[in-house]
């Protein structure tokens, strides 16, 4: 799973004339734009921020611009994920074209049909070892790409299911109980 880490960051903030009486609001607006996006410099997804402070008492005017430039510091909660890493997801959508999953119950992960290895699509379900992969089923997804597209985080993945994987399914037959002989023998030994 992606690691949750807290990082202190420095950022340049542009304070427009309308916000000169509330400079901290300019920093919060800049940080709000980072929320729930992948930031390559941090190698992760920004989930939250806190402790916003300016590092210097005064900002700078650059060239003829009426905008004041200032440096701010903040703590960011970052979920670090990297390409090739396996992340735990839950199936939320299933079509013949792709599997849609949720990571951390927030982020959509898309796995196109060409990246689903070890499963086949039939009767409206992706199937592995004959058992359907149901909505709500947990799966481990390898991260293929992470990008911000039109202010939305896009995570593409791939799934490698091997013959030895036996994921529980509500349609799967219940597993058989252990042999009765062992239970009788154990109970006799206990007497």
Image (cartoon, grey):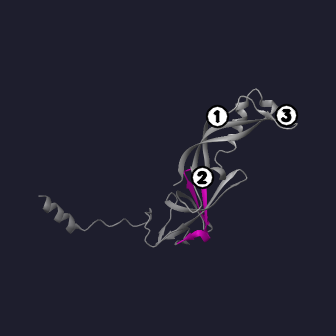
Check disc 2 and report its element: helix, strand or loop.
strand
Judge by depth and name the residue closer to the eye, 101 or 152: 152
Specify whether 177 is left or right of 98.
left
- The vertical placement of 58 against 2, above or below, is above
Quarter-of-image position of residue 110: bottom right
- The vertical placement of 61 against 144, above or below, is above
- Residue 107's disc is 2
Pointers 1 and 3 in contact (CB under 8 A)? no
Judge by depth and name the residue closer to the eye, 7 or 103: 7
Quarter-of-image position of residue 167: bottom left
Q: Earlier in the sequence, mark 3 or mark 2?
A: 3
Quarter-of-image position of residue 55: top right
Q: Which residue is mark 3?
A: 66
- The answer, for residue 38, to whether it is visible in the render is no
Q: Main secondary structure of the magenta part?
A: strand
Q: Which residue is mark 1?
A: 52
Q: Position of residue 43 (x, y in %)?
A: 62, 53
Q: Nearer the viewer, mark 1 or mark 2?
A: 1
- The vertical placement of 78 against 130, above or below, is above
Check disc 3 and report its element: helix, strand or loop.
loop
Check disc 1 and report its element: helix, strand or loop.
strand
Judge by depth and name the residue closer to the eye, 139 or 76: 76
Q: Which residues are magenta?
A: 98-117
Check the picture and name the quadrant holding the C terminus.
Answer: bottom left
Q: Residue at x 55, y 63 (%)?
A: 142
- Residue 73's disc is none
Q: Earlier in the sequence, mark 1 or mark 2?
A: 1
Q: Position of residue 165 (x, y in %)?
A: 44, 68
């Amino acid at each position: 799973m992606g690691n949750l880490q807290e990082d202190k960051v420095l950022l340049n903030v542009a304070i427009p004339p309308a916000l000169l009486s509330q400079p901290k609001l300019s920093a919060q607006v800049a940080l709000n734009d980072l929320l729930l996006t992948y930031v390559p410099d941090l190698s992760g997804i920004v989930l939250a921020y806190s402790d916003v402070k300016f590092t210097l008492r005064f900002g700078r005017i650059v060239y003829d611009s009426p905008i004041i430039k200032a440096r701010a510091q903040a703590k960011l909660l970052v979920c670090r994920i990297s390409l090739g890493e396996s992340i735990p997801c839950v199936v939320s959508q299933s079509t013949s074209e792709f599997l849609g999953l949720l990571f951390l119950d927030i982020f959509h992960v898309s796995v196109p049909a060409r990246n689903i290895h070890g499963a086949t699509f039939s009767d409206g379900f992706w199937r592995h070892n004959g058992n359907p992969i149901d909505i709500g089923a947990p799966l481990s997804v390898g991260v293929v790409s992470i990008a911000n597209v039109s202010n939305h985080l896009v995570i593409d993945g791939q799934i490698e299911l091997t013959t030895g994987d036996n994921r529980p399914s509500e349609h799967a037959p219940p597993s058989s109980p252990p042999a009765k002989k062992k239970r009788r023998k154990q109970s006799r030994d206990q007497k």
